[in-house]
Image (spheres, rainbow, N blue to C red):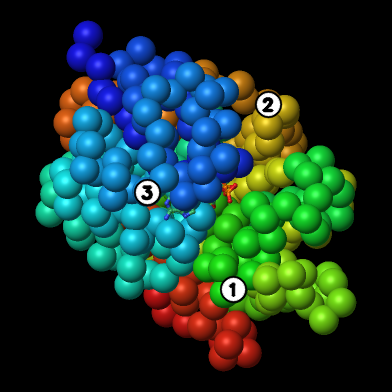
Amino acid sequence: MKKHRLLVLGTGGMAGAHVLGFRSCPNIEVVAGVDRDPARLAAFCAEHHIPKAFTSLEEALDWGQFDAATNVTPDSAHYATTLPLLAAGKHVMCEKPLAPRHADAREMAEAAAEAGVVNMVNLTYRRSAELAEAAKMVADGAIGELRHFEASYLQSWLTQDTWGDWRTDPKWLWRLSQSHGSTGCLGDIGVHILDFASHAAGQPITHISCRLATFEKAEGDRIGEYVLDANDSFTMQARMENGALGVIHGSRFASGYHNDLFLKLYGTEGAIELSFDFQRCWMRTCIGVDALRSKTWHEVSPTPVPTNYERFAQALDRGVGEDPDFARGAELQKVLDSATASHVAGGAELAI
Ligand SMILES: NC(=O)c1ccc[n+]([C@@H]2O[C@H](COP(=O)([O-])OP(=O)(O)OC[C@H]3O[C@@H](n4cnc5c(N)ncnc54)[C@H](O)[C@@H]3O)[C@@H](O)[C@H]2O)c1
């Protein structure tokens, strides 16, 4: 079996999940790590038995002995680090959001298409079998015409410390600070829930209105070099291509929820509801005569689907792209940019 040599770019909090995910793919060999923090890089490569380590992408590209890269740098670094990889003809999986600005994300998508390489955005929740089943059912017409939806992504790392202390850990602090490239809760998890909702619905969001909120979290809204000005919560109203209307919201202040996604889709002939977190996934449907008469809901247990890592690895074998690709990442970023513009315009509805 041909092994594809993989470079891990950025060896912080999320990179471990990438290594574990790719190590379960028999056609992938993790050959090198890159991080500009030498101590973090050394510890990571030692822990994961990665043979080569570089403190800059340039050094790794000069070495060149890899076929694909997984980009796990912070949001603000995705654009500047992905373009040289594409120019060198490397296949790239990039973390979400593809880039914090649509213009950059679009340029990345164009560069990937021009390079003809496999490109994918790590919209993690595509690994949800429930999401895949919901998308299939909607596409097959199981709930008739979609009319209404409700989607939320609830986190609580600002009110509890399961993932560590956000006040002292740079991995959380950069997410709270616009000058460190963060587009806040909207850019961080809004991208997931927008993908979740519109992928299941099988159609794009065409209109959006949005409100953002940033709460006081530290004296003077600052901790060291980090100005805490990125949004903590968002609420959106959205319209889809067929006119379906819905609400989408997310927060880092959702006490009682660790990391949960909810989606409810209501159509002319039935409904689908699902929720997804690391421990517990459920899906239920109320369709046809059940929706018409008894309002009976049935639990659904779909068969598992491959992770993004597995799908990227399979795409490398085929040499052709996989959804969600960079073009999808750019499409989502356009909605996110419009949501931010809507907030600035006092919550006005904007066409995408
Ligand atoms: N898909 C998901 O569910 C999910 C979950 C968590 C994080 N993420 C995404 O993963 C990315 C990384 O998040 P994280 O929590 O690991 O952040 P992190 O801050 O813990 O790690 C990022 C690492 O990248 C390094 N780095 C920064 N710029 C670099 C550069 N130019 N070259 C080389 N290394 C560089 C940093 O030194 C750091 O070690 C973010 O884009 C985040 O949004 C996605």
Q: Report whether the residue tagged 3 is closer than 8 Å to ligand 1.
A: yes
Counting other residues with Cα less than 10 Å from the Cα at mark 3, is it few (<14), some (14-19), or many (20 or more)?
some
Residue at the image point whose x is 86% and y is 55% from the top? 159
Nearest to the observer: residue 235 or residue 182: 182
Which residue, as the protein is rendered here, is positioned at the far bottom? 345
Residue 186: percent from left, percent from top: 60, 65
User: Helix, strand, or loop for circle 2?
Assistant: strand
Nearest to the observer: residue 186 or residue 63: 63
- Mark number for residue 316? none
Tell me the kind of residue under disc 1.
Gln
> Disc 2 designates what residue?
299
Residue 137: percent from left, percent from top: 47, 36
> Disc 3 designates what residue?
56
Q: CA distance from mark 3 to mark 1?
A: 24 Å
Which residue, as the protein is rendered here, is positioned at the far top? 1
User: Helix, strand, or loop for circle 3?
Assistant: loop
- Residue mark closest to the camera, 3 vs 2: 3
Tell me the kind of residue under disc 3.
Ser
Q: CA distance from mark 3 to mark 2?
A: 49 Å
| 3 or 2: tag closer to the N-terminus | 3
Q: Residue 22, can we see it?
A: yes
- The answer to whether the residues at label 1 and label 2 have Cβ atoms under 8 Å apart is no
Counting other residues with Cα less than 10 Å from the Cα at mark 2, is it few (<14), some (14-19), or many (20 or more)?
few
- Count of numbered tags: 3
> Disc 1 designates what residue?
178
User: Helix, strand, or loop for circle 1?
Assistant: helix
On screen, 350 above or below 74? below
Tell me the kind of residue under disc 2.
Glu
